[in-house]
Image: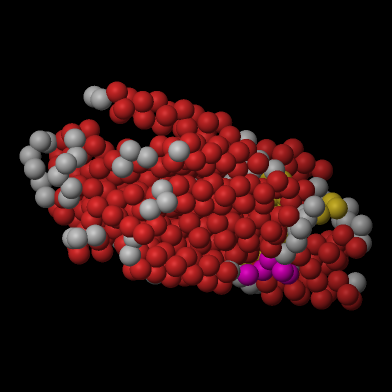
C-alpha cells in the first residue's frame, strides 16, 4: 500500500516538472509538487503515528514555521543566498541520516558504501553551501588560490583513499574531511561564477538524497533525488556553456584574479540623465540589458518606471537577459517579474542577438562582462569565446554604471569607449530615477 | 550485488533520464523558481528521517542527529515550496 502511494508521489513530481515548462502553468506545478511531498510524508508514517514522540512532531512544526517565516521575509534580490541556504540544509539532512545509518552495524556492504557516499556528498554540500552564502554576502574575499587548491587536492585524495580502502576508518574523520573539502572547494569561487556553484550544489543536494534512498530502500527518495540531481546538472552545464568554460575550470576558482592590462586608450563619453532622456525620446526601439548591478542597487522598480514611461510614448521596450546575469540562473527574470514586467518582453541571448543591429538604443544597467565585445575578438582574453549580448551592434548604447572599474573577469570593456556609447556614471537606481524625472521636462 | 540494488539502480537511471528530458524544456525565465522548487523536493530526505526515527529512539545521540536532519529537511521543504509559490505568483499575474 505504502509503495503504491509513493508511486503516486513520484508521478506527481514528474507531472510538476512537466507543467514547469510554461510560466502560465508553473504555479500549478508547484502545487502538484507540494501534493506529492505531502503524500510521501503521510505514506512514510504508514499510519504508525503513535510510534513518534512529541519531540519529533515539535521539531517538524517549528522547522516548518521557520521555513515559512524566512521564505516570506526574503527579498527577491536575496534569492541566491536563500537557495544557497536551502541547498546546504538538504545536503546536511542527507548527511545526518547517512551518519545515523552508518552507526547501525546491520548494513550490508553495498548499503555501507552508498551510506558513506551519501554522507560525504551531503556534508560537502552543507559546508560548501554555507561558504557560497558567505561569498554571496561578500563576507569572504581574496584567498591564495594556489595554497587553497593544494589543500583541497590533498583533502580530496584523503577522502577518496578513505572511501576506497577497506580499512575501517571512523566515520567522524570522513565527516571532518568532507566539511573541509566543501569549504576549500567553494571558497575560491565567487562573483559571476556563483550561478554555476549554486546550480552544482543544488544538484549535489539531490544526489545526496538519492543515495540516502538507497540506504533506507526508499524508491521515492531515489526518484525525487534523481530528478533534483538531473535538474541541477542541466543548469550547471547551461551556465558553464554560457561562459564558454568547463565545470572543471569554474570549480578550480580564482577566475579574474590574474593581472592584465586593463587601461583604456581614451576617455569614455560621459553623459547626463537629461541627455539620455532626450536620446531615448527620439528612439523607436529600446533594449534594456540588466546585470548584477541592477540587483545590487535594487533598481528593478526604477526600471519598471522607465519602461512605463517609454511605452507610454509608443517606444518598443525589450529586455535582453544573459544566462549568467546575476548570481543564480534566472535571477534577472525574477527581479523583473517582481515589478510586473511581462515575461513576454524578456528575451534570451539567442532570441535577441540578431535584433541589436535594428535597435535604436540599448540601455545597459549594471552589466559588464556579458556585453564585452572582446569575447568575440580577442583570443588572449579570459572571456574569449563566451557568448555575449552583441549590444555594440546597436545604433546607440547607453551604459549606467558607477565607474569604469572592470567586471568579474577583471578586464577592460572596449564597449565603454566606443563612439556610439555614452556612459552615465551613477548608481543604477538613482540614474534611472533621474532619467524618468528628466522625461517629464522633455 | 543484490537484485534489489540493481533494480533500484535501474529506477535511478530512468528517473534521471525523465528529469533530464523534462527539465531541458524549462525556459530560462523560470530557472530561479525551478531551482527553489527542486530544492524543496531535495528535502525528501525527511522521509528517510521518518523511516529510521523509531529505530533510534533509545540512543540519545543518534536520535538527536536524526532530529537535526528532520529539522533541516522540513525547513528545506516548507521554505522551498513557499518561496517558489511566491515567485510563481509574480509570473502568474502577467497572464
**Quarter where residue A71 is shown:** bottom right
Indicate left or right for A258 with A289 as reference.
left
Viewer-nearest residue: A142 or A242: A242
Viewer-nearest residue: A399 or A288: A288
Indicate left or right for B63 with B18 as reference.
left
- Residue at x-position 60% and y-position 65%: A76
* Residue B31 percent location from the top left of the image: 59, 48
Q: Is residue A300 magenta?
A: yes
Q: Residue furthest left?
A: A167
Colour scheme employed for the rendering of this structure: secondary structure
- Mostly what secondary structure, the magenta segment? helix
The quarter of the picture where the N terminus of chain A appears is: top left
* Residue A80 percent location from the top left of the image: 51, 59
- Residue at x-position 34% and y-position 53%: B49
- Residue at x-position 90% and y-position 72%: A442
Q: Is residue B74 above or below residue B52?
A: below
- Residue at x-position 52% and y-position 42%: A9
Viewer-nearest residue: A19 or A230: A19
Viewer-nearest residue: A162 or A355: A162
Q: Is residue A243 magenta?
A: no
- In this orientation, does residue A394 appear? no
Indicate left or right for A93 with A424 as reference.
left
Q: Is residue A291 above or below residue A5?
A: below
- In this orientation, does residue A300 appear? yes
**Quarter where residue A425 is shown:** bottom right
* Residue A342 percent location from the top left of the image: 77, 54
Q: Which residues are magenta?
A: A298-302
* Residue A26 percent location from the top left of the image: 66, 48
Indicate left or right for B92 with A335 as reference.
right
Amino acid at each position: 500500500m505504502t509503495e503504491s502511494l509513493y508511486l503516486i508521489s513520484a508521478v506527481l513530481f514528474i507531472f510538476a516538472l512537466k507543467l514547469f515548462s510554461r510560466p502560465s502553468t508553473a504555479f500549478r506545478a508547484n502545487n502538484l509538487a507540494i501534493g506529492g511531498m505531502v503524500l510521501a510524508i503521510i505514506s512514510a508514517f504508514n499510519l504508525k503515528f503513535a510510534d513518534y514522540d512529541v519531540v519529533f512532531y515539535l521539531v517538524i512544526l517549528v522547522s516548518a514555521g521557520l521555513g515559512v517565516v524566512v521564505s516570506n521575509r526574503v527579498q527577491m534580490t536575496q534569492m541566491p543566498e536563500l537557495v544557497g541556504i536551502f541547498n546546504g540544509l538538504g545536503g546536511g539532512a542527507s548527511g545526518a541520516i547517512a551518519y545515523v545509518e552508518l552507526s547501525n552495524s546491520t548494513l550490508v556492504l553495498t548499503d555501507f558504501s552508498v551510506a558513506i557516499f551519501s554522507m560525504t556528498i551531503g556534508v560537502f554540500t552543507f559546508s560548501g553551501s554555507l561558504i557560497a552564502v558567505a561569498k554571496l554576502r561578500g563576507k569572504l574575499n581574496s584567498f591564495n588560490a594556489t595554497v587553497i587548491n593544494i589543500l583541497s587536492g590533498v583533502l580530496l585524495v584523503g577522502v577518496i583513499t578513505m572511501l576506497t580502502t577497506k580499512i575501517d576508518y571512523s566515520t567522524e574523520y570522513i565527516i571532518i574531511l568532507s566539511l573541509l573539502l566543501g569549504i576549500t572547494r567553494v571558497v575560491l569561487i565567487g562573483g559571476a561564477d556563483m550561478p554555476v556553484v549554486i546550480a552544482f550544489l543544488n544538484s549535489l543536494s539531490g544526489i545526496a538524497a538519492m543515495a540516502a534512498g538507497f540506504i533506507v530502500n526508499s524508491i521515492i527518495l531515489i526518484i525525487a533525488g534523481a530528478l533534483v540531481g538531473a535538474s541541477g546538472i542541466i543548469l550547471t552545464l547551461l551556465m558553464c556553456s554560457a561562459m564558454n568554460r568547463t565545470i572543471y575550470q569554474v570549480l578550480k576558482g580564482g577566475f579574474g584574479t590574474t593581472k592584465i592590462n586593463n587601461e583604456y586608450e581614451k576617455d569614455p563619453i560621459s553623459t547626463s540623465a537629461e541627455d539620455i532622456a532626450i536620446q531615448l525620446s527620439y528612439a523607436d526601439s529600446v533594449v534594456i540589458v540588466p546585470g548584477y548591478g541592477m540587483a545590487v542597487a535594487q533598481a528593478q522598480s526604477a526600471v519598471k518606471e522607465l519602461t512605463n514611461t517609454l511605452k507610454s510614448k509608443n517606444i518598443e521596450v525589450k529586455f535582453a537577459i544573459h544566462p549568467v546575469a546575476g548570481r543564480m540562473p534566472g535571477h534577472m527574470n525574477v527581479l523583473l517579474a517582481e515589478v510586473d514586467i511581462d515575461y513576454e518582453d524578456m528575451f534570451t541571448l539567442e532570441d535577441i542577438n540578431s535584433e541589436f543591429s535594428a535597435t535604436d538604443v540599448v540601455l545597459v544597467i549594471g552589466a559588464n562582462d556579458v556585453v564585452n565585445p572582446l569575447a568575440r575578438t580577442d583570443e588572449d582574453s579570459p572571456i574569449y569565446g563566451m557568448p555575449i549580448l552583441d549590444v555594440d551592434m546597436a545604433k546607440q548604447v547607453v551604459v549606467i554604471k558607477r565607474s569604469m572599474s572592470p567586471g568579474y573577469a577583471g578586464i577592460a570593456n572596449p564597449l565603454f569607449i566606443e563612439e556610439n556609447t555614452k556612459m552615465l556614471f551613477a548608481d543604477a537606481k538613482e540614474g534611472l530615477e533621474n532619467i524618468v524625472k528628466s522625461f517629464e521636462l522633455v | 550485488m543484490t537484485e534489489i540494488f540493481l533494480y533500484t539502480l535501474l529506477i535511478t537511471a530512468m528517473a534521471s533520464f525523465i528529469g533530464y528530458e523534462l527539465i531541458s524544456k524549462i525556459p530560462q525565465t523560470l530557472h530561479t523558481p525551478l531551482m527553489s522548487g527542486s530544492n524543496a523536493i531535495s528535502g525528501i530526505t525527511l522521509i528517510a528521517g521518518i523511516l529510521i526515527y523509531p529505530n533510534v529512539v533509545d540512543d540519545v545521540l543518534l536520535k538527536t542527529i536524526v532530529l537535526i536532519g528532520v529539522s533541516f529537511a522540513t525547513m528545506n521543504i516548507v521554505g522551498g515550496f513557499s518561496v517558489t509559490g511566491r515567485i510563481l505568483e509574480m509570473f502568474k499575474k502577467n497572464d
